[in-house]
Image (cartoon, coloured by chain):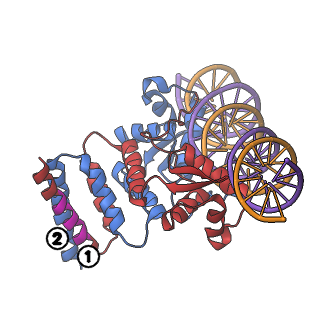
Chain colours: A red, B blue, C orange, D purple
Amino acid sequence: MTNKKGGSLSNTLPQLGELELAVMQALWARPEQSANSLLQALPQPRKCSLSTVQSTLERLHRKELVHRTKQGHAYVYSARLERSQLLGRLLGGVIRQLHTGSLDPILSSFVDFADRIDEDTLDRLDELLQKRKLERRVDN
Amino acid sequence: MTNKKGGSLSNTLPQLGELELAVMQALWARPEQSANSLLQALPQPRKCSLSTVQSTLERLHRKELVHRTKQGHAYVYSARLERSQLLGRLLGGVIRQLHTGSLDPILSSFVDFADRIDEDTLDRLDELLQKRKLERRVDN
DNA sequence: CGAAACACCGACCGACGCTCGGTTTTCAGG
DNA sequence: CCTGAAAACCGAGCGTCGGTCGGTGTTTCG
């Protein structure tokens, strides 16, 4: 049975590889970069050829994670999603894989994860939550 | 450069496959099952041979997601993690891949995800959070 | 003892991400 | 306009992973 993964977004994108991630990081650090520029920007032990970066960018482009425009004879790339947006999408993908219908398990597992986090962070989460609830009250 | 995925950086388990997930679901639905029993329990369009289920269980066992004991000539398997625990671990893996140092982006992207959730759920999250904060206060 | 049930081993396949070298295209400076 | 550098483009190969079996050995039980 063919493992039907391909379907661009909306579905669970197949978890980024190491280089793909590094490229995205570089792109978040400084938008509007060429493949060459991106190659230079890669962390020390991550050196590879320009071709490699290019094909990685090609993959990223197919996954609709970067946007590109031709400028002169070269492409200039930018991230299409903010880091937090990508994180949200990835999170959503994982959650969708394991949800039960009820939201409770999601919540408790998140709070479980938050268990390893200091109390300040818990407070901040609380803040965000309250803010969200307020906004919601205004919207509706 | 050899793709050092095997040990996965830190401990991000490489996202479960379709069958692996199905087996885990079956195992959560009813613990203590044999490979054969698991095979029967799989959803309709998921039919495959016993060997396939066995090697999937083997993989799951290597990933330490199931526990097994020999009972007679056959293994009996159980999940080593609750669904919510696995979810938490998976979530943690994704987060670790994209964290910035600051926790804020994590939190806001989670709350972003929660944006599509009704207010009741938000309230329940709040509850869980408060409870957690209390427990924490008692423990320390 | 013999058959059934199961574990165990090895093989193959397709999908992915990474890696690169060679070829073609494109642009800009002389 | 011509040429050389830079980049895109193409295709190949490699390793890993999940899924899929079939064959072979081993254990159990009637």
Q: Return the residue nearer the eye: B34 or A124.
A: A124
Q: Residues within 10 Å of mark 2 (few under 14, many from 20)?
A: few
Contact check, label 1 and label 2, Cβ < 8 Å = no
**Which residue type carries mark 2?**
Leu
In terms of image quadrants, where is residue C9?
top right
Which of the labelled discs sits on residue A21, or is there none?
none
Q: Residue at x 44, y 23 (%)?
A: B44
Quadrant containing the C terminus of chain B in the rendered view: bottom left
Q: Residue A78, percent across and down?
A: 51, 56
Residue B133 among magenta residues: no
Specify whether B88 is left or right of B115: right
Which label sits in the foreground, 1 or 2?
1
Q: Is residue A129 magenta?
A: yes
- Which residue does the image show at 55% across and 35% down from the upper left? B53
- Name the residue nearer the viewer: D24 or A61: A61
Name the mark on residue A120.
1
In the rendered structure, find residue B134 and report the number of the disc placed on it: 2
Q: How many marks?
A: 2
Q: Could you give the CA–CA distance between mark 1 and mark 2, rounded to whole angstroms?
A: 13 Å
Instruction: Say few, some or many: other residues with alpha carbon within 10 Å of mark 1 (under 14 / 14 to 19 / 20 or more).
Output: few
Residue type beneath disc 1: Asp
Instruction: State the residue in front, B69 or C23.
Output: C23
Residues in magenta, as a range: A122-132
Quarter of the picture holding the N terminus of chain B = bottom right
